[in-house]
Amino acid sequence: MTDQVPPPDSGPGKELNQRPLFSMLTRLSLLMVAILVLAVVISMFMLYLLPDQVWLAVGLSLLIILPIGVGLLRSQLHAMIRLFHTLAGTVISYQDNDFSIGVHWPLEDELGELVEAHNALGDVLRKQRLNLVQRELLLDTMVQNTPVAMMLVADRGPIVFANIAARQLLNQGRKLEGFSFNEVMIQVSASLREAILRGGDGLFTVAAKDSEEEEEVYHLARRHFSLNGRHHELFLLRHLTVELRRQEVQTWKKVIRVISHELNNSLAPIASLANSAAVLVGRGQTERLPGILLTIEERTRHLESFIDGYARFAKLPTPRLESTHWDSFIAGLKSQVIFTVIDNLPEEAINLDRAQMEHALLNLLKNAHESGSREDEVGLGIRNLQGVIRIEVMDRGSGMTDTVMSNALIPFYSTKRSGTGLGLALVREIIEAHGGRISLQNREGGGLTVSLFLPIPS
């Protein structure tokens, strides 16, 4: 749509797109000169007619000249004024995100250059708006159809956005926008509410509705940012049950391969040595039997140690709780591994299985050193938080990706070539046997924090 502004003094017989000989300023100057010349001619003519009545001649001259001058100026300025009003109208349209209006000025003068620049600006804004709309449409389609539940909350107040997956998970498919975040949290499962309240990223489990269904596992991720001057928090809920089942099958296959490989490596030499011993006994050459029997014993003990490691995970004994002071407990740890104690240790003693807890923390501290952190960057902090002891093992390594964090606590899952995948899984078993829980969270600036929460009996 284009608003056309007629040129000054344009008539039916005039060509609208004619190129003027002079600029706008020159035309106005010539018009003023012409009016002055006309005024002089009319004044001289009136004085010639009324030589004895000068004031009357001047008055009549003004009555004739003023209407003519005003008419000529009006004819030149009328089109310009209309153009200015049109430009003001298009600016208002731009403010309303309507860039479909253009302006036409037939003369190639200063105003023509202004109109050309204005139209070029409109074209740029129109193209940018079209690209933005297309990107918004693409982004909205992707966000709405992703299986990850997304919910955006402003200042822990109203929910400003929720995709289809979030509506189905949190509000039975109904709209969430406009509802209070706290109101929605009352309706969700207790495990999700607890996961959100404890902060950070992590896994949580939703109990099955009946005995025929299995519990569902989700991964919660949250991101903070500022939008339009307000603090916003984005919650991402990813359903991991199917992926974990697939990973579980792969894990069992890996376990079978590992055990089979280790058994073959141990049993094949033992069988060979036993056969050699039998041959030597048959020949009466018994001088080599002690060495053969010693090798068989070593291979047997190695196999026993290997099986015992898996048995400890499968049959973790019930913790034998005893009152333990943190000073002596940390001193025992420091004699085995290097780390920095963060803040002061709690003065109150706690009931725990010292051997199991020491084994769990040694696993975490060794993992922290293997993450690539310097020795002085590996830290351990213990805090009393309203009836809960929080133990944090921190490093400055590369942290964990979402995929690794989602699977880190699964038995036999390992990113290390020689790892068994039992370290973190055994830590979780020990902590849960003490009635606590474990949480993994990436640190700002790089690194990982493993948090252990132990209840304090009232």
Image: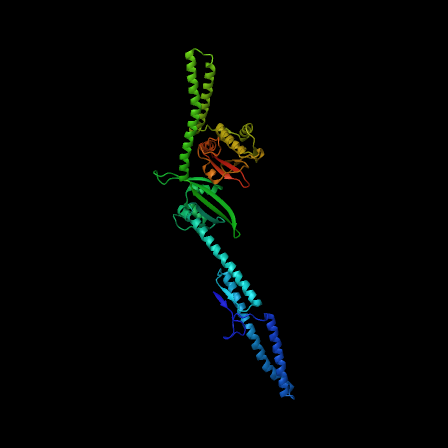
Residue 4 or 21: which is nearer the viewer? 21
Residue 279 or 420: which is nearer the viewer? 279
Q: Position of residue 143 (x, y in %)?
A: 44, 49
Residue 341 or 305: which is nearer the viewer? 305
Residue 103 or 350: which is nearer the viewer? 103
Extreme residue in the bottom direction: 52
Extreme residue in the top direction: 284
Q: How many marks?
A: 0
Q: Position of residue 71 (x, y in %)?
A: 56, 77
How is this picture coloured?
rainbow
Is residue 323 rendered to the left or right of residue 147? Answer: right
Is residue 220 rendered to the left or right of residue 35? Answer: left
* Residue at screen point 49% across, 67% down: 3
Q: Could one spot residue 348 in this view of the protein?
A: no
Q: Position of residue 4 (x, y in %)?
A: 50, 68
Extreme residue in the left direction: 212
Q: Position of residue 133 (x, y in %)?
A: 47, 55
Is residue 80 rendered to the left or right of residue 164? Answer: right
Q: Could one spot residue 355 in this view of the protein?
A: yes
Q: In this picture, is 190 found above or below 426?
A: below
